[in-house]
Amino acid sequence: MKKFGLGFVALVSIMTLAACGTSEKGTDSAKEDKVITVAGQAAPMTDVVKVAAEVAKKDGWEIKLVQVNDNVAYNDMVMSKEADASFAQHRPFMEKYNAEKEGTLVAIQPIYDAKVGFYSKDYKSVDAIPENSKVAIPNDASNEGRALAILAEQNLITLKEGVGTNATTKDVVENPKNLEWLSVDLLNLAEAYSEPGVALVYNYPTYISKIGLKPADALFLEEKIDDRFSIQLVAREDNQDSEKIKALHKYMTSDEVRSFLEDEHSDTLLPSF
């Protein structure tokens, strides 16, 4: 009876230890499950993620920012599940990626609208832009169309009726100043500003800031903001309804993030939530 009793105690002890081990492992898993990985490319997008991360800490969530150097890697990371979401692009750019790479990215929430437009080192008015001038525009379809639409707002060109921000240079039906198109990668547009003969350069605040300029320095900005170009929180079709993305949405649209955008970046953007 004593042996049985000792054996029973030993068995209970082993089961208790095993249960403790399971509990600790479960705790570790729970901690891991509270980590949300977000891919980003440049400020202020990366700064917004950092602000959201500070808010998330209060509820036990960790938002981990992974910063990349180009405009493809953050989408590749989300698609390969190396990241849960990204914050770096607008909807048309995301849709272009999906079409080209058979992606399943989805726009979750617009966060802000950047103040975009054209900059000129040599001219102070639209009328002063001479004929045969070079105009630097993005070489990707989604941003090219937006740039052309802004030029049309200034009556520098006329686009085919109905194309709007989906335009390409082939949709320019009137070009009275005979402007010459210089297609440049979005990340390199700021460098085109100093190129000889370039009268106008399209750009975002994020990239033009590299050469010390801001929207207030633009010759003209976009007049009618198209909300399709709001910078978006992006996830995948398979995780868009997950607890992680719901939590991320909550923190990215928090009062703290709105205050950060309004207080620190009102000269370059407008909150869109």
Image (cartoon, rainbow, N blue to C red):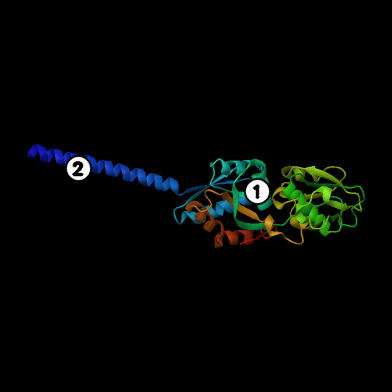
Q: Is residue 254 left or right of residue 21?
A: right
Q: Is residue 112 above or below residue 95?
A: below
Query: Where is residue 122 shown, x and y percent of the image?
Result: 86, 50
Q: Residue drawn 54% across and 44% down?
A: 83
Dot label at residue 12:
2
Q: How packed is label 1: few (under 14 Cα within 10 Å), some, or many (20 or more)?
A: many
Query: Where is residue 174 shown, x and y percent of the image?
Result: 89, 54
Quarter assignment of residue 158: bottom right
Q: Is residue 78 above or below residue 219?
A: above
Dot label at residue 94:
1
Residue 243 is at least partly visible in this image = yes
Helix or strand or loop: what does disc 1 sit on? helix
Q: Is residue 231 above or below residue 80?
A: below
Query: Where is residue 25 shown, x and y percent of the image?
Result: 35, 43
Dot label at residue 60:
none
Q: Residue drawn 90% across and 57% down?
A: 127
Count of numbered circles in the view: 2
Comes first in the chain, label 1 or label 2: 2
